Image: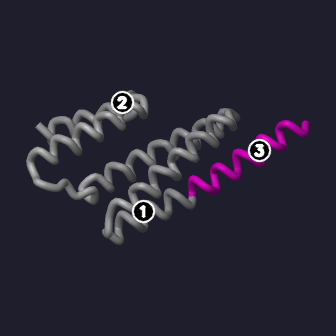
């Protein structure tokens, strides 16, 4: 059951709004809690990192279409997701990836602010 929900969430991640993805994540945590006495958060860190990367990709697309407000919002969400993924695990691999996504999200957010300022000055 848990594997089926995880597979569904992974396939539909790009079409499902964040609030529903969060609900599915909480459902997965609850379902895994029923199987184990205590669900380790690290089991979900890689999925959280994928959410961060997805938000960062969407932020890049928004920046290219000059939707600077949306780009900053998505970059901020990617930054939060990356920080959450980093805190959920002790894995060096996941933490390195999370730090890289967070760094790129901060840079993209700053680039969006700069671009919005330049666009407003014209």
Tell me which label, 1 or 2, sits earlier in the chain. Answer: 2
Residue 24: name its quadrant. top left
In the shown orientation, is residue 90 left or right of residue 18?
left
Q: Main secondary structure of the magenta part?
A: helix
Tell me which label, 2 or 3, sits earlier in the chain. Answer: 2
- The outermost residue toward the right is 122
Tell me which label, 3 or 1, sits earlier in the chain. Answer: 1
- The outermost residue toward the front is 37
* Residue 67: x %, y % from top left: 67, 33
In the shown orientation, is residue 91 left or right of residue 54?
left
In the shown orientation, is residue 39 left or right of residue 51?
left
In terms of secondary structure, where does tag 2 sit? Answer: helix
The colour scheme used here is one colour
Q: Which residue is mark 2?
A: 20
Q: Which residue is mark 3?
A: 115
Quadrant containing the C terminus in the rendered view: top right
In terms of secondary structure, where does tag 1 sit? Answer: helix
| Labels 1, 2: front one | 2
């Amino acid at each position: 059951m848990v594997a089926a929900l995880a597979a569904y969430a992974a396939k539909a991640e790009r079409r499902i709004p964040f609030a529903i993805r969060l609900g599915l994540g909480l459902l997965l945590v609850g379902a895994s809690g029923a199987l184990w006495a205590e669900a380790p958060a690290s089991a979900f860190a890689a999925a959280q990192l994928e959410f961060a990367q997805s938000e960062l990709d969407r932020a890049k697309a928004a920046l290219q279409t000059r939707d600077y407000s949306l780009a900053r919002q998505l970059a901020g969400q990617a930054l939060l997701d990356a920080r959450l993924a980093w805190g959920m695990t002790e894995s060096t691999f996941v933490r390195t990836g999370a730090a890289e996504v967070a760094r790129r999200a901060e840079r993209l957010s700053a680039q969006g602010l700069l671009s919005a300022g330049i666009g407003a000055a014209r």
